[in-house]
Image (cartoon, grey):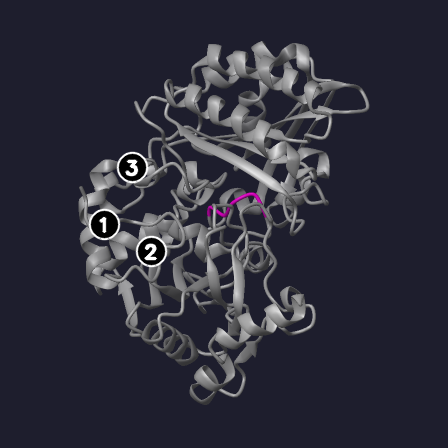
Amino acid sequence: MKLDLVQAVLALQPNLTALFGPHLSSSAQIILPTTANFSDHLQQRWTDYNAPSFTLGAIKPATEQDVQQVVRIASANDIPFFVTGGGHGISDYHAFHGLTIDLGAFKSVSISKDRSHLTIGGSVKIHQLVKPLYEAGRELPLGSCACVGVIGSTLGGGIGGLHGHRGLMLDSLQSVRIVTADGHLLQASRSHNQDLFWALRGAGSNFGIVTSATYTLPEISNQGMYMNADFMLPASANMSFFRVMKEFEHTMPSRLAISAGIIYNRVANQPVIAVNAIYYGPLEEGELHVQAFKALQPTMSNISMVPADDIMDAAYFRSFGQDNGACTPNQHINIYSMALKQMHSPTFESFFANLVDFWREYPGFQGRWLLQRYATDGPLTVPSPATAYGYRDAQIYMNFEGFYDDTNLDEPVNAFLTAARDDFSKVNGYGRMAVYPNYARGDEGPEAWFGAENLPRLAAVKRQYDPKERFSNHIPIPVHWP
């Protein structure tokens, strides 16, 4: 009976091979949902929480013309489609049922002969750029997680340790090639399709499929040697740690990046605070900026100079480059996130105490609290109206990352973290909920994703390039605002 039902459902679905096959290149792949180990043929998602369902199958285009044809045919037949690049998105996609367009074939990396520009394909991940950039003596404000898609990250802002010095990834973006909802292949830059290029930089998932992107490359800092500092602090140092982080609010050097992971050690039955600080300059300068952490009497510490192509692996006592959950696919990860313009220490201290209680009440919860403090010097060199990104003045990006296997914990985790997000939103300096678009859960709303000041213009660009909302699966821009 169950098999009959499956066959009946499949009979109602479009025949992908007949519909798309004659119009695609010989290198394109059509993967039906009945294919053995179907998901293994696709880019794996980082989290299975509220994941999309590719009930119609998948197409892996091999050329830009393939992408155009897939979009045209899918749109003409009202087939919903979902675009996958790096696979590290975390938003709520549970309502999506349809076709996935997997960009796995778009993985080219090319640095110009004069080393001034980089051009990459739509599925290139951060780890694919680390060595080529280092060998070319160049750098970009890449994020800290090696498996994240570069273009997807860029279109949502592109934060990272170097952005205090170099600006956001989207500030280095010079042009893109994009297939829009009508199947046209366009170039967008400061001189071509300027409104589209403005909107792509901050809300880029809403307008089409970026097949390639070109970036400007600055020279590498300090001849490619960065200072890496790691500290492990006991739970008893939490108030002092928050005080130190608060003190950086007005003194954060542009070349310094601080991240911290607050986790629970189940063996010791105690939380610990792991701090990583990277200074993109000489050791003698960098050490001065981390003295406050050394003064907290860490139980472990390490300060060393590291080549740029090793900095991701070196972080957190060389544990971040290992299997710590940042790149392991198909985990159950329930994430809440926010951007903060200011740090309200009492709220941090109160949440720390509540989080410890929650860890102890729910032993199956392996969640962690991630803080990223970056300088705003680089982002603020570009006027906010120049792009659609709404948080150039954000000083802290914060994630509550709920790792656990037991889905029965979803309800208590959601209740606990929703309340925490509401508490932080009251004191974040924006007067409303604010979230980095790439960290968005999906329930925060357009003002939280893009800022109210950007929405009228974004809605106008949406009406021009995607009036039927084909590209509205991820943090969708309304076609009318207000």
Q: Is residue 26 above or below residue 273?
A: below
Q: Are marks 2 and 1 in contact (CB under 8 Å)?
A: yes
Q: Are marks 2 and 3 in contact (CB under 8 Å)?
A: no
Magenta segment: 141-145
Residue under numbered circle 1 = 458
Residue 142: say if magenta: yes
Dividing the picture into quarters, in which one does residue 456 lie? top left
Residue under numbered circle 3 = 447
Q: Amino acid at mark 3?
A: Glu
Q: Is residue 85 above or below residue 282?
A: below
Query: Cα distance, mark 2 to mark 1?
Result: 10 Å
Query: Cα distance, mark 2 to mark 3?
Result: 15 Å
What kind of element bears circle 1?
A: helix
Image coords of residue 87 (percent x, y): 54, 56
In percent of the image, x 43 and y 79: which residue is there?
A: 66
Residue 133 appears left or right of 188 = right
- Work out which quarter of the rendered image holds the C terminus and state it: top left
Query: Cα distance, mark 3 to mark 1?
Result: 11 Å
Residue 206: numbered disc: 2
Nearer the observer, 275 or 433: 433
- Work out which quarter of the rendered image holds the N terminus and state it: bottom right
Q: Amino acid at mark 2?
A: Asn
